[in-house]
Amino acid sequence: MNRDAAKDLLTRMADDVLILAHRHSEWTGLGPLLEEDIAFSSVAQDKLGHAQALYAIMHEHLGAPEPDAMAFGRSEPEMRCCHFVELPNGEYDFSLIRHMLFDASEYVRWSALRESSFEPLAKLAHKIHGELKYHLYHAQTWVIQLGANGSEESKARLQSALNEAWPYALGLFEARNGDADLINEGVFPGEDFLRGQWELLVHGILTKAGLTMPDEFAAILGGRDGYHSEHLNPLLVEMTEVYRIDPSAQW
């Protein structure tokens, strides 16, 4: 197996969920409903667990630093998250659309990874599949409710948020040079395949919600190469504050 390519794949997956978990956690105490405070907090906690598990696989099998060092000890250029997860939460409509688009991609990705030839990754995919089903169910339920069964204003706000989010969401599927080796080795099916499956899934959700899937948008790329939006560094400063006081501290 191409270890460098595998490390790159797992790093970008882990960084995505780590940063989005932080964004989701910012809704705690601020959601439009009490149950949404709890739901976003629960999803955030699950995503932190997924990030930790991915960092642990990299540490144990691919020679990466320990999980805490991977999560909190890297600088902005060393992060491999896409721009989509870095964006501020904005209004609830944008966060909800991002939640749906991201977790549709996670559901497709991890469903495929259950067949990965990299056994630790396949085992993790089987373990967290149920959590991902819940995440997607929560997101699509609210999108459909506010789109198909809400007011004209709620539907229009969702469509506007979808149009804004779409090019960033396409950045989830940015291909990398080592991906061809991983595809040939059966580690994962490749970003183009995953994007195709994701678009089918998202199209079905949007149709039920009465929303229109955007087209002719160019993907916003760069995060996989360490080129990030202006929003990531302030988030990292806040997220790593305690770790930076004493990285060697034992809790």
Image (cartoon, grey):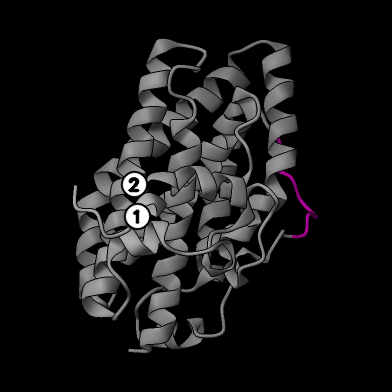
Q: Which residue occupies the foreground of this view, 232 or 8? A: 232
Task: Judge from the rendering whether residue 142 lies leftward or rightward of residue 220; answer left or right.
Answer: left
Element carrying mark 1: helix
Name the residue: 65% across, 29% down: 90
Element carrying mark 2: helix
Please state the horizontal and vertical placement of residue 232, each as a whole percent of the image.
60, 51
Seen from this angle, which residue lies furthest front? 245
Amino acid type indicated by mark 2: Leu
Q: Which residue is mark 2?
A: 48
Seen from this angle, which residue lies furthest right? 216
Decide whether residue 213 is among the magenta residues.
yes
Query: Which image quadrant is residue 51 in?
Result: bottom left
Name the residue: 39% across, 73% down: 188
Range of residues picked out in magenta:
212-218
Query: Which image quadrant is residue 8 in?
Result: bottom left
Prevailing SS of the magenta stretch: loop
Q: Which residue occupies the foreground of this view, 3 or 142? A: 3
Q: Which residue is mark 1?
A: 51
**In the picture shown, does residue 103 fall above or below 153?**
below
**In the picture shown, does residue 43 fall above or below 125?**
above
Decide whether residue 157 is among the magenta residues.
no
Q: Which residue occupies the foreground of this view, 202 or 12? A: 12
CB atoms of marks 1 and 2 within 8 Å:
yes
Query: Which image quadrant is residue 209 in?
Result: top right
